[in-house]
Image (tube, coloured by chain):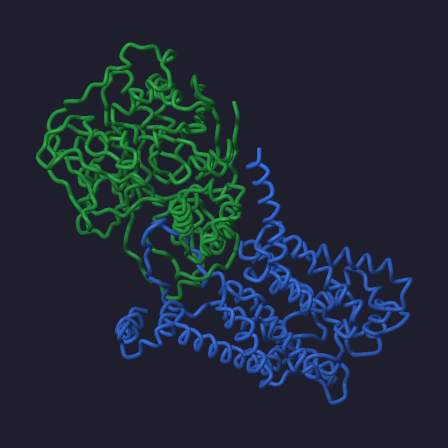
Amino acid sequence: MEKIEITKGHDIRISGIPNSESYTHIMPKKISISPKSFRNVKPKLLVAEGEVVKIGSPLFYDKTKTKVRFASPAAGKIANIKFGPRRVIENIEIEIDGSEALKNDSLQGKELSSIKRDEALQFILKSNLFHFFRERPFNQIPNPDKIPRDIFISGYNTAPLSVDLVRLIGDNHKVFQKGLSLVSKLTDGKTFFSSKEKFNFKDVENILINGPHPAGNIGIQVHHIKPLKPNEFIWTINAQHVLTLGKLFEKGIYDPEIIVSIGGSGAIAPYTAKTISGVPILSLIENQNLNKKNIRIVSGDVLTGKNVSEEGYIDFYDSTLSLINDNVDRPFLGMLSIGTSSTKYSLTRVFFNMKEVLFNFTTAQNGELRPIVPLNTWEKVLPMDIFPNELYRAILAKDIDEMEKLGIWECDDEDFALCSFSCPSKIDVGEVIRDGLDLIYLEG
Amino acid sequence: MQWLRNIFDNLAPMFEKNGKLERFHPLFEATDTILFSTDERTESGPHIRDNIDIKRVMILVVLSLVPCYVFGAINIGYQESLTFGFDANWQRNLISGLYKIVPILAVTFATGAFWEILFAIVRKHSISEGFLVTCALIPLTLPATIPLWQVAVGTSFGIVIGKEIFGGVGMNIFNPALTTRAFLYFTYPAQISGDKVWAIAPDGYSGATALNIPAGQIDSDAVTLLNEASVNTVFDFSWFNMFMGWIPGSIGETNKILIILAAIFLIYTGITSWRIMLGSVIGLVLTALLTNLFAPYSSNAMLTIPPHYHLVMGSFLFGTVFMATEPVTSAHTEIGKWYYGFFIGMLTVIIRSINPAYPEGIMLAILLMNAFAPLIDYFVIKQNIKKRMLRYAQ
């Protein structure tokens, strides 16, 4: 078994760690799915307001890849289809009524070992769940007609406040194995499964990975296992979705259950919820007593998540809801403060914060935007053989040739989130990396 | 401090967009955030951020310079008492020194702030804290006897030509504080070189720096010359005394202990690069050993200076710790920093030895390597690109 030890990086000690011992069941009354969650997809609706759908019924498809249809995570009535400017579909809300599900029994009773690539692919496409997969580079919905070099699955969450995947996979070992075997059919290359624990799954290449965040990120794992070259692409799928595919193979129906962790400095009682995909924020924070408090709600982890309102929903690929205190105070002569472990948090030693204790983060930027003063803080948290400073400059200069030379094909914005976190000039490095990838995508 | 906060909150609208004093927003913002930190929140991306910011970084560098100022002041008074031949306690020395340093410091900060604020208002960017460090460094590199108008002219040149015309902090090519010194050195050499300016002394008195003593001497040994000078003059040029800093020199560079302590502090906090410092000490020691090997074949006394004397003579340590490590103008890559530092150490010895007209080699060595730092980075990155291209070709 290959072993990868990541040394660079940092596990942010944020307070409000969710209790992962037990899951709280949360069954919402409505759910939502947003086509905006899927990068580079041009959605075309297949349903209208008022229509009744089953779990697994297609709600919309992608005009650029018509085979890719997006399943409804719930059964019930389409309550609302929200449009944004220029009639961009914002989201589709479904009022839950029952649990009737579309059944796909094309692989029913078959041995996993006898299934061929095309059968497996058709099975997933027909179940309208192909959007579980994402393609690197660009982190977009892949084209099902193209075969990826390899498939990568991370069984190790290192992001702050995230769901304990090691435990989840351990609890569902058998179903997960089925999901993995099914997924592994889709490539002619290898399927890499990385985790902190030794699982020894069949049909995949097991990789033992250890280290601080971002060791659990797919981009970092690909970089260390088998880096991407220009014009190569790999697929990746969340471990929770592998589990869903395992259940799909067993029963022939889509089980939209997901595990979501709720935590952060703004959470009173951090917990882990067993709920369904597209759950409304309100259902998750009912017990957190947030009213009248100034709390920022983030769908996703605190490093890469999106700001959402109480009326919003958990994004399709997210399994963390972070609540952060939004009150920022202005201490007198703060820049001269000695700083203690409870008032200052820094990866450098510019404050007197010796104790490694959990920290009550706020949304404070802790400084103003400044030109880069290269103190090598980015390099210290980026476990990749890439020069972030130079790549950043190449992107600002829109020099695609230089970006490729500096390795942008191996990058995704989430892997650079810690660089932005630790940057003394408060530069959002990840955003620029995303701009660079978008530019390359547009230029074809 | 709530009352002060309230005053600022009341004043704020005047400086906002369409306010009466909108033009002076950078000045208001800088004062406001220096006193009270910023209340800016993250918009997207990481919703939480590290507490380090450029203000903190810069203020820590400034704080690390304070001991050099205090010692510098005491030493000015001490050298004065030596040359005039009277006994004095450290309190008198300190006051006498402060009497010299405070005007220089005030002129530097006034000039520096003037240019920084002017450019911030005209170019509509925020005031960068970097000028605090630049202005705190400049007086330490000058002799106490420097005329104040030269301080103002030099600081103006350093801030405007060394930094602002490139776009301000982060875009400059040369270290602005060293640009100031180099400008003064070449424009007004009489006030910043030779053997008359380094100590406050009676007219006609020679107060050479340690490096001046062997410079230009023929067929003699540098250490012997220094020992002779210790006997023949009031100054003590023994190795230990040079290390302790009780010698004539620029204001802030003489005490090596304080500089080493500041270096430890800056390295510990993670602000400056130990690679550059170590690299340049290695470069200096190796090159000095090399010149020692050549010394028997040459009449140049500078070649005979042993490495441990090179370390404590002149401003080498001060330049290495505070100037060479300036993050913007040094090499950016970690491997590049080794080369950058090494060459600074090497060039320092070469300039000191080969060209006795410029006995203080570190200033020119750093400025030269500032110019070459991007080239060093270029080669380091090229290696990385080459490795990647090889993998792509597989």
Q: Is residue A194 above or below residue B188?
A: above
In the rendered view, does A399 fall on the left or right side of B288?
Answer: left
Give the chain ID for the blue colour.
B
Give the chain ID for the green colour.
A
Front-lying residue, A170 or A153: A153
Across and down, in percent, residue B289 comes to 81, 57
Across and down, in percent, residue A302 comes to 34, 45
Q: Is residue A111 above or below residue A243?
A: above
Q: Is residue A224 above or below residue A172?
A: below
In the rendered view, does A139 fall on the left or right side of A322?
Answer: right
Q: Quadrant of the C terminus of chain B?
A: top right
Across and down, in percent, residue B129 comes to 46, 67
The residue depicted at 73 percent of the width and 80 percent of the height is: B82
Across and down, in percent, residue B336 comes to 62, 52
Residue farthest along the bottom direction in this orientation: B203
Let me know if residue A203 appears in the view. Answer: yes
Let me know if residue A417 appears in the view. Answer: no
Q: Quadrant of residue A140?
A: top left
Q: How many marks?
A: 0
In the rendered view, does A204 fall on the left or right side of B394?
Answer: left
In the rendered view, does A304 fall on the left or right side of A66?
Answer: right
The residue depicted at 68 percent of the width and 57 percent of the height is: B280
Front-lying residue, A204 or B282: A204
The residue depicted at 33 percent of the width and 33 percent of the height is: A163
Residue farthest along the left direction in this orientation: A50
Q: Quadrant of the N terminus of chain B?
A: bottom left
The residue depicted at 35 percent of the width and 19 percent of the height is: A118
